[in-house]
């Protein structure tokens, strides 16, 4: 699984309450069971490319908690063709996807 999953598992083991976000319904279907595995029923939409979506996420989180202790930002996407070869050879355009 991902680095984010490993972080979430360790945080939960340490007693943290967790919330999860996703971009789009296809990812929600993947995030829901992972959140449930870690005892969280807070799974919210968030498109990090849209400021209003980020604001809506934090507004919703305020309904659950008075404050946040930390955020793990673990988003990654790449054109599969860019994953062949060395990281330093990744094109600038690939980071704009």
Image (spheres, helix red, strand yellow):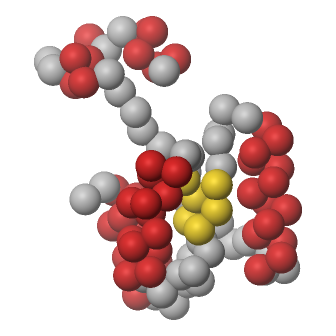
Is residue 74 visible in the rendered structure shown here?
no
**Image location (x, y in percent) of residue 8:** 43, 71
Q: Is residue 22 left or right of residue 11?
A: right
| Label tally | 0
Q: Is residue 66 left or right of residue 71?
A: right
Q: Check the image and report above or below for 95 versus 75.
A: above
Given residues 93 and 88, the one toward you in this image is: 93
Q: Check the image and report above or below for 71 versus 50.
A: below
**Image location (x, y in percent) of residue 6:** 33, 67
In percent of the image, x 57 and y 80: which residue is there?
41
Q: Quadrant of residue 87?
A: top left
Given residues 72 and 43, the one toward you in this image is: 43
Q: Quadrant of the N terminus?
A: bottom left
Q: Is residue 97 left or right of residue 19?
A: left
**Image location (x, y in percent) of residue 35:** 46, 74
Q: Quadrant of residue 31?
A: bottom left
Q: Check the image and report above or below for 55 versus 80.
A: below
Is residue 75 visible in the rendered structure shown here?
yes
């Amino acid at each position: 699984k991902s680095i984010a999953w490993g972080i979430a598992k360790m945080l939960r083991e340490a007693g943290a309450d967790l919330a999860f976000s996703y971009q789009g319904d296809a990812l929600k279907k993947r995030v829901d069971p992972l959140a449930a595995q870690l005892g969280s029923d807070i799974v919210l939409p968030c498109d990090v490319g849209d400021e209003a979506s980020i604001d809506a996420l934090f507004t919703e989180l305020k309904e659950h908690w008075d404050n946040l202790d930390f955020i793990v930002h673990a988003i990654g996407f790449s054109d599969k063709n860019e994953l062949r070869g060395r990281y330093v050879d990744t094109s600038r355009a690939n980071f704009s996807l």
